[in-house]
Image (cartoon, rainbow, N blue to C red):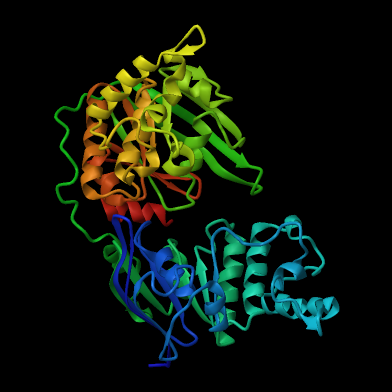
């Protein structure tokens, strides 16, 4: 055994109503490549935010030890002084600054009181050599691709004499070539004595370069596996090995009808990242059916939903869309709404709700025209309908005039759902419908979903929770890197089959 450089001991972190980390313990040896794996929501990113000082000492219980010494970080800067650096999926570079300015931002080389730009440029060249990036340091970051920007982030970390480098899904937005280059760089950094901790969903890269793997599930440490113990089946079983339990209510009747929505050869190009994010998708959903869409973070599931719902991100979309057999072309969400489609966003606080408004206003906002007569809102009718939905969806609130921000996550989700149900859709797209809510609230959401499809609605459910996909879906499409990796019936689907398709 080598020297233990890092130990996280009995780490517990709670948010209101949620225990994100529950007594997590793991060790990392010096110079090792250590992967953290687990389903979305397992606690991986939260754990790394504890480690890097994003969540300071006192906001969690347990100990962080580096070289056997307990650390008490009050900020990210404290962890940097201890030799840690973290690189997130969302890169923290300043696009309009040069490469050298980004590498030494906040850490500029000085001569007395003044910045020594010549020395800053000279040293940035050294850091670029370390990561194998051949670019002029004076180049503006904006002009470089995502793969090169990722290398600049690592060069920036190395400039601070990092000992432990944390990478959160570093290849999620990279193409195959850039991903390969990054993995080779991490192997090279290992030779230089840098310890790497990586979060990844891509099992092939885990198997390729990992020395050890710690598996998290539901905020708990499940296992730590050595390289000799690693194989795909073992990792998957540790990641998903839990019973579905009784949280998925049985549907009273299944009456699946004709196709309500279909896409053919559906592709989307995202100009903001200069790549195709969806490629040649062919799928359909039927009346009275819950269609599950599974896949890992970054696979393109939300992008697919947005491209359907009026293409709010202005992707270059090609392919054909049919609703009830009629060919459609949506250029705005209003077009989708008028065709009977509703979309419940994965981020209810940012995109689904107006937090400072009350329950009544949030419920009626997507159907406001129905309450307007002679340019005046009929407030009595708005109150009557809001009260009706409060009761039918069992929204727990002191009053329909209570601010939405004061409700629990589960009740906020019911308001977000109610808003679109009030619009009377035929097809409902639910993006992560139970994210961040407790088991009881989940059961209520599932019950509502069952009732809606029994009444003939079509539901497309995007979810990162495999048990949820398996427990609720009549049929499942698995998306991997913007493509359909496979289709499974509810009866034949299993967590292992889905994970294998999702990690191709």
Q: Quadrant of residue 234?
A: bottom left
Above or below 42: residue 209? below
Q: Residue at x 17, y 39 (%)?
A: 249
- If the image is split into quadrants, where does the C terminus sit? bottom left
Q: Residue at x 36, y 71 (%)?
A: 60
Q: Is residue 470 left or right of residue 340?
A: left
Q: Nearer the viewer, residue 21 or 314?
A: 21
Q: Residue at x 59, y 25 (%)?
A: 331
Residue 226 in percent (x, y) is at 35, 80
Residue 450 in percent (x, y) is at 23, 32
Res 405 seen here:
yes
Residue 451 in percent (x, y) is at 22, 28
Total numbered badges shown on the rendered structure? 0
Residue found at the far right of this picture: 118
Above or below 56: residue 355? above
Q: Nearer the viewer, residue 31 or 117?
A: 117
Above or below 195: residue 285? above
- If the image is split into quadrants, where does the N terminus sit? bottom left
Q: Is residue 347 left or right of residue 91?
A: left
Q: Nearer the viewer, residue 97 or 494?
A: 97
Above or below 198: residue 28? below
């Amino acid at each position: 055994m080598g020297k233990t450089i890092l130990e996280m001991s009995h780490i517990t972190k709670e948010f209101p109503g949620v225990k994100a980390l529950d007594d997590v313990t793991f060790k990392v040896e010096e110079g090792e490549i250590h992967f953290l794996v687990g389903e979305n929501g397992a606690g991986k990113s939260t754990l790394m935010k504890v480690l890097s000082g994003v969540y300071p000492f006192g906001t969690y219980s347990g100990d962080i030890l580096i070289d056997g010494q307990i650390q008490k970080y009050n900020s990210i800067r404290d962890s940097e002084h201890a030799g840690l650096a973290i690189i997130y999926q969302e890169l923290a570079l300043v696009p309009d600054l040069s490469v050298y300015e980004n590498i030494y931002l906040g850490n500029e080389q000085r001569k007395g009181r003044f910045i020594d730009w010549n020395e800053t440029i000279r040293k940035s060249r050294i850091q670029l050599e370390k990561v194998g990036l051949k670019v002029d340091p004076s180049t503006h970051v904006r002009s470089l691709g995502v793969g090169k920007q990722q290398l600049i982030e690592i060069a920036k970390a190395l400039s601070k004499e990092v000992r432990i480098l944390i990478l959160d899904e570093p290849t999620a937005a990279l193409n195959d070539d850039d991903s390969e280059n990054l993995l080779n760089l991490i192997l090279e950094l290992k030779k230089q004595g840098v310890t790497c901790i990586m979060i990844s969903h891509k099992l092939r890269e885990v198997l390729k370069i990992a020395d050890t793997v710690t598996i998290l599930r539901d905020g708990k440490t499940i296992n730590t596996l050595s390289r000799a113990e690693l194989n795909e089946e073992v990792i998957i079983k540790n990641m998903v090995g839990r019973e579905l339990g009784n949280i998925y209510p049985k549907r009273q009747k299944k009456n699946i009808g004709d196709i309500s929505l279909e896409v053919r050869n559906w592709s989307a190009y995202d100009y903001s990242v200069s790549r195709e994010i969806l490629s040649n998708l062919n799928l359909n959903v039927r009346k009275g059916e819950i269609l599950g869409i599974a896949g890992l973070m970054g696979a393109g599931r939300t992008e697919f939903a947005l491209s359907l719902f009026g293409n709010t991100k202005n992707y270059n979309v090609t392919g054909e869309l049919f609703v009830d057999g009629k060919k459609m072309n949506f250029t705005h969400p209003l077009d989708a709404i008028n065709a009977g489609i509703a979309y419940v966003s994965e981020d209810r606080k940012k995109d689904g709700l107006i937090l400072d408004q009350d329950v009544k206003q949030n419920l009626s906002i997507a159907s406001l025209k129905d309450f307007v007569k002679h340019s005046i809102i009929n407030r009595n009718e708005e109150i009557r309908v809001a009260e009706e939905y409060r009761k039918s969806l069992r929204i727990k609130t002191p009053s329909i005039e209570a601010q939405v921000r004061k409700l629990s996550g589960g009740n906020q989700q019911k308001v977000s759902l109610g808003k679109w149900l009030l619009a009377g859709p035929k097809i409902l797209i639910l993006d992560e419908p139970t994210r961040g809510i407790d088991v009881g609230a989940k059961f209520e959401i599932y019950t509502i979903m069952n009732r809606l499809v029994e009444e003939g609605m079509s539901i497309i459910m995007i979810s990162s929770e495999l048990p949820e996909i398996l427990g609720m879906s009549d049929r499942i499409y698995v998306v991997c890197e913007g493509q359909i990796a496979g289709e499974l019936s509810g009866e034949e689907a299993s967590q292992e089959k889905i994970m294998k398709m999702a990690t191709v």
